[in-house]
Image (cartoon, grey):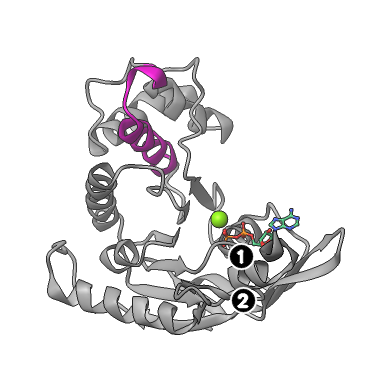
């Protein structure tokens, strides 16, 4: 750990109390992320990726160990992008982005100077006065990106932001995120995904989490400089390496399939008899 670390996760253990008792979700995690770094968290469904973001953001404080975003200046420490754009349907694109400034106490006199450039950066110039239902899902997610980037926070937390989009739209948004990122050299990104190629394309480092109770299974550096081309064979190599690692953690089923541990437990349980 160094003083340059923006995000510090140390000896992190997290579980939930459920009807069946206490279930450990994260069983010891250590990770530090510096300013300017883009890190993807990849892992099977239910391994605790969203929970890690919730703990970093302070939404969830019930854990042992450290999960923190370090602040060095007053103001907003992070912004969040989710799988669903979560726009206010009665507000226009512009008003949705302004709302983030309003909610964080930015004076109204600054709104136009901050909102209009960010809408241009995400490719929404000309759509400022459209309502969410008048634009496509991809454009709604561009609005969500604008709302997150307008805050100028040192950290961006992204929870599967492109998983709900068709592949072509997702691809154009990944390209956009690479561009936005290259314009913000000091921002740290934590990007949750289960898409290994997406993780390879976007990240400096890919952190592969194991099944629940999860730990970090592997960290892969993506040594491909920006700007990146989708067709760069080195990205395919990283993606293949990640896929092999994930497949080696899977188990075979009687019918010749492959499943991750948790699903296997479910298949082998009482449900399987039905
Ligand atoms: N509020 C909660 N109460 C009980 N269990 C929870 C709660 N939130 C999440 N979990 C459990 O914790 C595990 C991790 O959830 P989550 O972080 O959403 O996984 P991921 O984002 O990797 O798919 C899941 O098995 C989920 O069922
Ligand atoms: Mg999740």
Magenta segment boundaries in residue numbering: 131-150
Magenta segment: does it hold 13?
no
- The label shown at residue 214 is 2
Comes first in the chain, label 1 or label 2: 1
Residue depicted at x 12% and y 65% = 231
Side of 186 relative to 125 (left or right): right
Q: Position of residue 116 (x, y in %)?
A: 30, 28
Magenta segment: does it hold 143?
yes
Q: Position of residue 63 (x, y in %)?
A: 76, 68
Check disc 1 and report the residue beneath it.
Answer: 48
Residue depicted at x 24% and y 38% = 121
Side of 147 relative to 78 (left or right): left
Side of 146 relative to 77 (left or right): left
Give the answer, above or below, for where 138 lies relative to 216: above
| Relative depth, front residue between 53 and 230 | 230
Q: Main secondary structure of the magenta part?
A: helix
Q: Residues within 10 Å of mark 1 (few under 14, many from 20)?
A: many
Side of 274 relative to 260 (left or right): right
Residue depicted at x 38% and y 23% = 93
Disc 1, ligand 1: is the CB inside 8 Å?
A: yes
Disc 2, ligand 1: is the CB inside 8 Å?
A: yes
**Element type where label 1 sits in the image:** loop
């Amino acid at each position: 750990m160094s003083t340059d670390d923006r995000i510090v996760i140390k000896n992190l253990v997290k579980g939930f109390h459920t009807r069946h008792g206490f279930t450990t979700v994260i069983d010891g995690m250590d990770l530090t992320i510096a300013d300017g770094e883009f890190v993807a968290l990849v892992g099977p469904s239910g391994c605790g990726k969203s929970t890690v973001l919730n703990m970093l953001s302070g939404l969830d404080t019930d854990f042992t160990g450290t999960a923190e975003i370090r602040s060095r200046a007053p103001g907003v420490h992070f912004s969040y992008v989710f799988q669903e754009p979560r726009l206010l349907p009665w507000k226009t694109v512009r008003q949705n982005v302004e709302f983030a400034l309003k909610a964080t106490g930015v004076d109204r006199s600054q709104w136009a100077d901050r909102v209009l450039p960010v809408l241009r950066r995400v490719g929404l110039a000309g759509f400022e006065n459209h309502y969410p239902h008048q634009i496509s899902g991809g454009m709604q997610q561009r609005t969500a990106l604008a709302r997150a980037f307008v805050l100028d926070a040192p950290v961006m937390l992204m929870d599967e932001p492109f998983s709900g989009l068709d592949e072509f739209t997702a691809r154009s948004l990944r390209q956009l995120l690479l561009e936005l990122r290259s314009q913000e050299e000091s921002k740290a990104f934590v990007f949750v995904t289960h898409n290994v190629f997406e993780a390879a394309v976007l990240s400096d480092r890919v952190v592969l989490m194991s099944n629940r109770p999860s730990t970090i299974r592997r960290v892969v550096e993506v040594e491909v400089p920006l700007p990146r081309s989708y067709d760069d064979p080195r990205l395919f190599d990283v993606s293949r390496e990640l896929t092999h690692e994930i497949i080696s953690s899977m188990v075979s089923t009687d019918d010749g399939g492959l499943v991750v541990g948790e699903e296997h437990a479910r298949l082998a349980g009482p449900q399987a008899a039905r």
